[in-house]
Amino acid sequence: MKVYTSMAKGKTLVQNDACTHNANKPSLRSRSNMGAPEMLRSPFNDRAITMGYHLAVEEKEVYYWVLSTKNEATELIVYNNHGIIVTHEDIASLVPYCKITVGLFITSAICTYTIVQPRAHWNEKMAMSKFRERILYEFKYIGNFQLCAYNLIFFPIYASDHHYLVCFNFLKPAMTIIDSAKPPGNDYGIEKYGDVPAKLKKYFLHMLEYCNNMKQASALRKVEPAVLPIQWTTATNKSNSGVYVMRHMETYMAQKVSDWKYGITSRSALSLQYLRAKISKALLFGNSNALMGDLMNRTHTCYEEAKKKGPVDVEKMIATYTKD
């Protein structure tokens, strides 16, 4: 789960003990950037990553390390934010055209293990309880977290070998599914998602009521899930669904699709591979990563050692990378 702060200007926040409940939550996002806790921020919280076919020096160093160590990737922890970890193997899935692992989606585990693939012996009541507990657990290091300060709540979903996003909007009540997969026959119905949207809404409402966020629960009670008809859907670029979700979480602010400065088209296969390089740097070198210093040294050393053996052209490595 991930957060974006209130869109309302100059609105006084009312203290709500339930809002500060230590919680393991989905990804939330706020528009006016009132200062979301570091743990909830996207690694790209300073500004949206600029799309393009040029990499900065640190992006080259990081991505050269990702590319050159792919076949040696281990369970070495390369990202740690208060116990929320990403391994070298997870980062290695950011090489071009590779399907991104669930492990790289730190916040998708909440839905994966309680809604999409719950334990066989769990009944609905138990799964709902685990969903709530998981959210509350992951927020326990945040401190004075106030859910009532935020308007957009994101849940990355991984189901049927595909990543997509569900966004709850408190300010303009809505439950929006954002999916890069082109629907057959341009049918934007929700049937393809099975019971996941209904369960997610039910479980999230339960958590809101448990935390005494009654205003937010009331706002969402009557909403129905709807798929956002975006223009950059694709029927062939399936390996990049995780990259699309990262970009969606980074740039979606509940604006009209026509006003959404997304920066990718359905034909942007190569630009998506460059985006993987930029995501690698943003994640590993973000302030939320307690291991940032170690990764800076590790990737810089790897890059400099390679340069001693000859020219290193990371952009060319990306452009000529062969799909597995």
Image: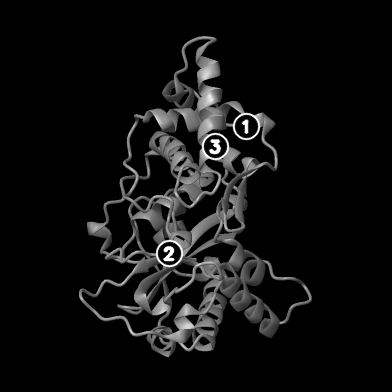
Q: Nearer the viewer, residue 140 or 152?
A: 140
Instruction: Residue at 66% x, 67% y: name it.
Output: 113
Query: Quick check: 90 above or below 227?
Result: above
**Looking at this rendering, what residue extends furthest in the right direction?**
121
**Residue at position x 24%, y 75% in the image:** 8
Q: Is residue 38 left or right of residue 6?
A: right
SS label for mark 1: helix
The residue sitting at 43% across, 90% down in the picture is 214
Q: Amino acid at mark 3?
A: Leu
The x, y position of residue 278, in whole percent, is: 42, 39
| Residue 124 badge | none
- For mark 3, give the secondary structure: helix
- Residue assigned mark 2: 37
Q: CA distance from mark 2 to mark 3?
A: 23 Å
Marks 2/1 in contact by CB < 8 Å: the verdict is no
Q: Quadrant of the C terminus?
A: top right
Please identify, in this view, whether the residue under mark 2 or under mark 1 is nearer the observer: 2
Q: Quadrant of residue 206?
A: bottom right
